[in-house]
Amino acid sequence: MLSHRDDEETDESLHRAISPYLFAADNLSDPHLVVSKESTPINGLPAIRKGVEPLDDGHYILSADEVARFKSEEPAANKVIFPLVGGREYINGQARWLLVPSLLTPQELRDLPLVRERIRRVREYRTNGGPLARSLADRPMEFHVFRQPKSRFLVIPEVSSIKREYIPIGWLSPPHLPSGKTRFVAASGSAEFPILTSRMHMSWVRYIGGRVKSDYSYSGNINYNTFPWPALTDADKTRLETLAQAVLDARAAHPGASLADLYDPDVMPANLRKAHRALDLAVDRLYRKAPFESDRERVEHLFMLYEKMTAGLLAKPDKPKRRKKADA
């Protein structure tokens, strides 16, 4: 069998069984096992969610110049203008803002013609849109999805270049709002960032996750909710926190560089690469003592854990026995 995935070198190996994901299934009870979408985490992790989806045809999304105009002409609207961070903005260090008119009172809106004009445009767009848009047309100030984190949250871009060794994830805090092009985890603990940014999790994403064209498409239902999570002691968590901070410090040592710059595989800074390697090694050892030689080995090990984790969840219930009719 010839086996490879994305950036790994092609290698030849012989196996009795091959999984649908084209890695060895010799150690699986069911070599045909596939990962099922899960609407909630089955691994004990906090919930992951999509960000804000205004369904507004872009009328509530503001550029820097538009924000400046609001500040000049309608400063009362400033309190409902928030930094909006999608995957593209987060990775490339770009800036957009979101106007949230539903947080204004009718009395406040009376004196804000610029805001009211945008509300009118959204109503018009939804009235002439598809079924979902039309269902919200008489509530033009409401978003299709509005989620406003109250504390620091972990942000994961929905789409990331397949050329990167790692999907650049990290922390944001209010007043930032995550857009629908990100996934976010609120009230996250100390272990989520280091493990999700590790080579181990990236192996799961590479083999199990979907694609947009050729780029990674991060799915909460597939990549996050199903990922086999290691057992962690307090000492493990403390070590992971230290190594994760080293990654963040390495990023911060390059002010002005975007995450796209830092995670370009050709020019990734040596200190950042070193910090990631140390973190990768620590996470690998949480899963087994023997080192992993490749991402394929990692995902084969993870898949065995997934099979065990879902053994009870995926088992088909026994059909109820039909009762015999009593004699007349």
Image (tube, grey):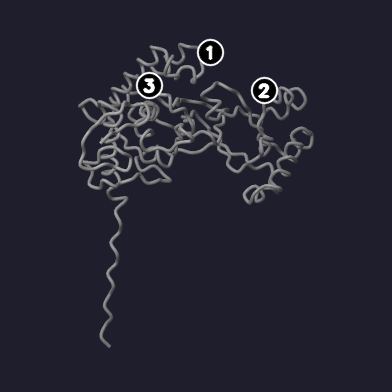
Task: Give whichever of discs 2 and 1 has the lower sequence position.
Answer: 2
Q: Are marks 2 and 3 in contact (CB under 8 Å)?
A: no
Dividing the image into 4 quarters, which one contains the C terminus?
A: bottom left
Categorize mark 3 by other alpha carbons within 10 Å: few (<14), some (14-19), many (20+).
Answer: many
SS at badge 3: helix
Give residue 67's position: percent from left, percent from top: 69, 25
SS at badge 1: loop
Categorize mark 1 by other alpha carbons within 10 Å: few (<14), some (14-19), many (20+).
Answer: few
Task: Give whichever of discs 2 and 3 has the lower sequence position.
Answer: 2
Disc 3 marks a residue whose amino acid type is Ala
Give residue 71's position: percent from left, percent from top: 72, 23
Residue 244's tag is: 3
Identify whether 112 is placed above or below 221: above
**Residue identifier under label 2:** 64
Identify whether 213 is placed above or below 323: above
Of residue 109 and residue 142, the one placed in the foreground of this image is 142
Disc 2 marks a residue whose amino acid type is Ala
Task: Tell me if 268 is positioned left or right of 10 in this view.
Answer: right
Disc 1 marks a residue whose amino acid type is Gly
